[in-house]
Image (cartoon, rainbow, N blue to C red):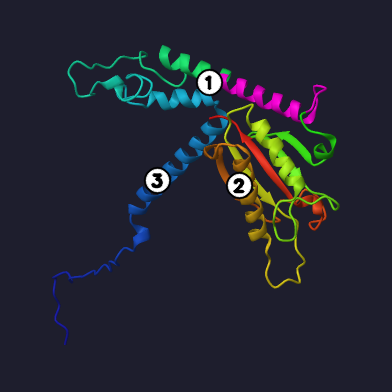
Amino acid sequence: MAVDSNVAPVIIKRKKVSGGDGHHGGAWKVAYADFVTAMMAFFMLMWLLNATTEKQRKGLADYFSPTVAISRVSGGGDGSLGGDSVFSENTLPRVGTGATSLRPTSEASESRSMQPDMAQAGAEELRQVEDLLMGRTGESMVDDGLLRHIVTRVTDEGLVVELFETADARLFDEDGQPTELLRALSGVIVRVSAMVTNPVAVEGHVSAYPVVLAHDPSWDVSSGHADRFRELLISGGLNKRRVDRVTAHADREPTERNPMDPRNNRIEVIFLRGS
């Protein structure tokens, strides 16, 4: 039998609380904001590099440079602060008074102004040697029999004098010894070298050998040719200290389309430009 009661029933409500996963928190938003900010800064940097001139970029770089005496633009002199220490109490920052590549000191400016004149004078000497060697001034120091084996060209490295052989006139015999033709050509180079003081480089080139050979001798042959011609120059009167280098190129730089053409057998003598 139920008993009547005026007491309200007790209702217990249990709320299920589940653990929050990482994507429900707020930490990822901070990381994502940092990533977006970094990407925006990167794209702005790329845009600035593309949209500004070299002078404007230099101005931006100078803006963020420290304006102390060690700055390349804002202070110092030639060398390390002209001999003063940056920690010396007598050395103070001086904006705009230091030496730069664009505004050097008077001594450096004078020395730099002399360099183009010296380089121009050296180039003019090489052109005069080339003209005299090839007879472009109406008088050549080489007879026609030897002149047909000489080609000259002026490059950034210097004056290149190419001595090449033909099918009927060889520079070296089968034993690798210089022929009378090459000895005569070496005498021409020695006489030409007396007109200038430039260092000399000797380079050996040969035509390609048949691929059926088990051993490719092109490197050894070109090296031997270059070294023997160096000996010819020295024995002819060239100061050995002027020989800057002796190089072998094997058959890697042919002048003719046919790599086995005898024209590819040659010695190149380079009168190097002065530094």
Q: Are marks 1 and 3 in contact (CB under 8 Å)?
A: no
Q: With 242 as the anchor, is 173 left or right in this view? A: right
Other-residue count near label 3 (Cα within 10 Å), few / some / many at <14 / 14–19 / ≥20? few
Nearer to us in this view, 68 or 80: 80
Element class at badge 2: helix
What residue range appears in magenta? Answer: 118-140
Residue type at numbered disc 2: Glu
| Residue beneath the point at 74% across and 43% down | 163
Mark closer to the chain start, 1 or 3? 3
| Residue beneath the point at 80% across and 42% down | 149
Q: Is residue 26 visible?
A: no
Residue type at numbered disc 3: Ala
Of the numbered discs in the image, which one, if any, rests on residue 231?
Answer: 2
**Badge nearest the viewer, 2 or 1:** 2
- Residue on which the image places disc 1: 115
Nearer to us in this view, 78 or 148: 148
| Residue beneath the point at 71% across and 44% down | 183
| Residue beneath the point at 64% across and 26% down | 195
Other-residue count near label 1 (Cα within 10 Å), few / some / many at <14 / 14–19 / ≥20? few
Q: Are marks 2 and 1 in contact (CB under 8 Å)?
A: no
- Residue on which the image places disc 3: 33
**Badge nearest the viewer, 2 or 3:** 2
